[in-house]
Structures are given as C-alpha cells and as structure tokens.
Amino acid sequence: MVSVWRGTVLLVFAVTFASAQEGKIPKQLQEELTKLYQQAAEYMRRSSPLFAEKATNSNANFRIRSFQGTGKPRSLEMFRDLNRDLYMEVWADSLRVIRVNNQAMSNKYNSREARNHPPEEQKTPSLTETEAIERAKNYMRVFGMEVPPCFRLKGAKFNYAGFTFRWSVSWGRFSGQYPWDGEYMPSDHACVVFHEKYGLSSIANVCCCPEPKTLNVKLSKEQAITKAEKCVPLVQRTSFYRSRLLDGFVSKAIRSCELKVAAPNWLLDPKRAVWIRKGPPEETRLCWVVQFETVDVKAQERKGSLYSPSIVIYIDAATGETVGAVF
C-alpha cells in the first residue's frame, strides 16, 4: 500500500510532466493516484456513515489543479460524483494530501436546496470544545495526518458561518510568537469540519510556505502606521484597484496594526506585483499589517453609499519596505 499518508515523499513520482501543459497525467502516476484515491475513499467510509451510504464505486477522474511558475504541475485533484462522493487534492511532486472533502456532506448542507430549506437538526452541540478538538485530531490521524508543530489552535466553533450544524476546528501557523496572516492573504492552515452524527465533512492541511529569514523588529508600530498611511492613495491608483472598485473612498481610521508573517505581493511595484499566485511564495516576511477603514465621500453624488472597502498595507518590520497591499 502506498505510504503517502505518513508524509513520505515519493521521489519516484517526482516525474517530469512533459505533457502537463495539455493537462495530461502520465499513466503510471494515474495508477498510483487510483490506489491513493481508493484508500482515501475507504478512510472516508470509516469516518462518515453518510458517505458510506452515498458513495459510488465508479472510476475516479484526475486533473491538474494548479501549476508552478515553471509550468510544471503544482497540485492534482481527484473526484468521482461531486454530489455525493470524495474530492481530494494532493501535491504533484510528493502525493502528500492537501485536502479531502466529503461531497455527500457538502451537498446535504451547502446545496441550494439545503440553503433554501435547511434540515431540522440540533442547534446546539453535545460535544464540548475539548472533545470536538480531539475528535478533529482523530479524523486527521485516520488519514495519516498530524497538526504541524508550527501550528496553533485558532478555535473550535459549532454551526459557524457556512458550516451549518457542524463543528469547524482550525489551526493557524506561527513563527515564534508571531501568527501568520491568514485573514487577508492566503496562508498555511489546517481545518477539520465534521458533523456529530454523520461524521467527517472535510480536512485541509496546508503547510508549504518558507519561514521568514528574520523575525527582527526594527520598525516601531507608529513608524509603520506613518509609512502605511502614505501608501493608501498609491494603492488606489493601481490598475488592480481601479479595475475592481470605484473611486471616492478615502481613509477614515486605522482598524488594526499587528505583527504577522505574510507573503509579499509587491502590489505597488508593477515589475514584481503578484495578484494571483501560481504556486507557493518564494519568501515570507514579518510585517506590520496595517488595516485602514475607508469612507465613501461620493455617497451624496451617487445618491447612496457603497460598501466601503478596507485597505491593508504590509510593512516589513525589519527593513521598513512596503511589501504588499490588499483591499
């Protein structure tokens, strides 16, 4: 049996995808992916009685989900019936699992029919938070996963946001005492979603970004805010901003300013700007993450105020560089 569940890197499958640009996966790799998918489906049957009831035995489909900047595949996805079977994503070079999703559970609670006519189920949990966290870890162990040592618990919530009638247990990455910024930029994380009765809904376990080269803080919070304030109007002049938002918003107040690790997107540097990532970032930095509230000063002219976006500026805590922005 293929031992990728324990995180073993299968060098034999670090193949050159000569036909990757056409979305083709080598036959030998397809055979190994089939074994991997079947094993994962068996694990999901043990973890969810709803999945065991709904799953099919049809052949899985394989597809390259994302590419690296070099054109080689970064991740692969496998699926059968997306209304009731298993969806799975793995790293292309090592076949290590990134995420698994019980589509039968997703369809039961996230489909349009479920949203329009939600099932009558328990509104309060029977598990404590501690019990929910341990159950989430047990589900990960079934799939041969462990919470990475650089992750810390973010929380365990029941019936939260889009996870109707289910527990969501999540962990975020830390470098030393500093959390990674997973709110505004994509970040490494782990999350397990499950139903108390119907079992596992999904697991995501993403840890692929490099550590920052330094955690030195040479810039004060006040200095970072001063630099960030000057960047807000510059962000609003970029093509990224103008293509998505109307003008007429001005900075109103600072909502937060915190030290977090983030991947630079160089939004204010046209030569290096990264709006959509094709793979893991080449570097991360410890940054002052400064979030500004905006106000619509053209509300009267527009005869109604529009949603005012937040603008977030990333200032390198060691060098003082402006390394990114989001809105």
Image (spheres, rainbow, N blue to C red):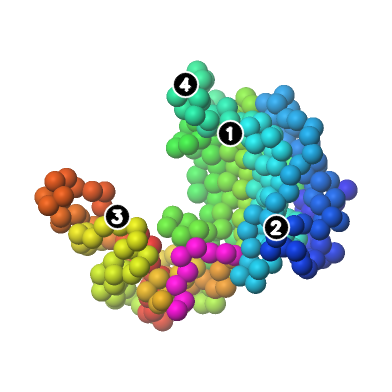
User: Residue 141, percent across and down?
Assistant: 72, 44
How far, Cα to Cα, is label 2 from label 3? 37 Å
Disc 1 marks which residue? 106
Quadrant housing residue 116: top left
For badge 2, the amino acid type reads Gly
Residue 8 lies, in percent from the top left, at 79, 59
Q: What residue do we see at 29% from left, 55% from top?
A: 309
- Residue nearest the viewer, comparing 43 with 243: 243
Indicate the amino acid at tag 1.
Answer: Ser
Specify whether residue 277 is painted magenta: yes
**Mark 1: few, some, or many residues within 10 Å (few <14, many ≥20)?**
some
Q: Earlier in the sequence, mark 3 or mark 1?
A: 1
Q: Earlier in the sequence, mark 1 or mark 4?
A: 1
Mark 4 or 3, nearer chain start: 4
In this rendered view, identify the residue nearer to me: 313 or 62. 62
Q: CA distance from mark 2 to mark 1?
A: 27 Å
Magenta portion: prevailing SS class: loop
The percent position of residue 190, horizontal first and vertical second, equals 59, 50
Please tell me whether mark 3 sits on a helix, a strand or a loop.
loop
The secondary element bearing badge 2 is classed as loop
Which mark, by number, is residue 309?
3
Where residue 17 is drawn, which disc sits there?
none
Q: Is residue 243 left or right of residue 286?
A: left
Alpha-carbon span between mark 3 and mark 1: 30 Å
Region of the chain picked out in magenta, as a range: 271-279
- Distance, label 1 to label 4, CA atoms, is 15 Å
**Relative to 306, is 321 above or below?**
below
Q: Is residue 270 magenta?
A: no
* Residue at numbered disc 4: 117
Which residue is disc 2 drawn over?
23
Going by the numbered disc 3, the residue's amino acid type is Pro
